[in-house]
């Protein structure tokens, strides 16, 4: 369940991957629920040991099978160490995050593309209700920003 730096690699290759994915849901209009993060302009100041942003997408009719890639731009300001992110998701009859429906990875500043569709628990969701992004090592960044967040679907060659 640890993608290591795959989301960073894919993000840096976005220009070559664009032809292999299509936008399904732009999520920037969703105001996330912040925990242990204080809004600071377009960023969030880390204010606790378990900082997280939770996104309620229950009204968007998102299917895990048809939106398999989570794409966003990430910035870590006042960096003290390499940031680690933990993404949780839930839907169908599940009403909140669990370890079983999650993944971790090492982040870097820039675009990140997270292959949620590599996980059967994501693909099995007929209706995604929400997801959460945690900064696992809270001392890594003085503040973080997550922008241009969207879900995409891989395009399969025929």
Image (cartoon, rainbow, N blue to C red):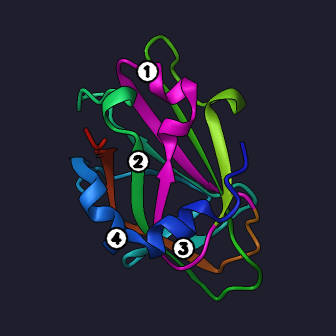
Relative to 10, say whether 87 is above or below: above
Q: Is residue 116 magenta-colored?
A: yes
CA separation in Å, label 4 and label 1: 28 Å
CA separation in Å, label 3 and label 1: 29 Å
Q: Going by the image, does 133 lie left or right of 55?
A: right
Q: Earlier in the sequence, mark 3 or mark 2?
A: 2
Kindly identify the residue that appears in the image at 30 percent across and 55 percent down.
Answer: 20
User: Which dot marks residue 125?
Assistant: 1
* Whether residue 9 is visible: yes
Q: Secondary structure at mark 4?
A: helix
Q: Is residue 95 magenta-colored?
A: no
Kindly identify the residue that appears in the image at 23 percent across and 50 percent down.
Answer: 22
Q: Earlier in the sequence, mark 3 or mark 1?
A: 1
Report which quarter residue 48 is drawn in: bottom right
CA separation in Å, label 2 and label 1: 14 Å
| Image quadrant containing the C terminus | top left
Identify the residue under disc 3: 144
User: Which dot marks residue 69?
Assistant: 2
Identify the residue under disc 4: 16
Which dot, 4 or 1, sits closer to the camera?
A: 4
Kindly identify the residue that appears in the image at 52 percent across and 16 percent down.
Answer: 94
Are the residues tagged 2 and 1 within 8 Å (C-beta)? no
Name the spot of residue 77 as percent of width and height, x first: 58, 85
Relative to 36, say whether 127 is above or below: above
Question: Residues in magenta?
Answer: 107-136
Which dot, 4 or 2, sits closer to the camera?
A: 4
């Amino acid at each position: 369940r640890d993608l290591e730096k795959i989301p960073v690699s894919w993000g840096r290759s976005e220009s070559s991957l664009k032809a292999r994915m299509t936008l399904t849901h732009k999520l920037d209009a969703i105001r996330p629920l912040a925990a242990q993060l204080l809004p600071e302009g377009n960023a969030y100041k880390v204010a606790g040991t378990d900082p997280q942003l939770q996104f309620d997408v229950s009204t968007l009719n998102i299917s895990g099978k048809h939106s398999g890639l989570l794409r966003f731009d990430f910035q870590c300001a006042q960096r003290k160490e390499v940031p680690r992110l933990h993404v949780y998701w839930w839907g169908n009859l599940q009403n909140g995050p669990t370890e079983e429906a999650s993944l971790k990875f090492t982040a870097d500043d820039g675009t990140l593309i997270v292959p949620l569709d590599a996980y059967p628990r994501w693909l099995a969701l007929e209706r995604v209700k929400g997801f959460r992004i945690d900064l696992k090592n809270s001392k890594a960044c003085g503040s973080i920003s997550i922008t241009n967040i969207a879900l995409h679907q891989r395009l399969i060659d025929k």
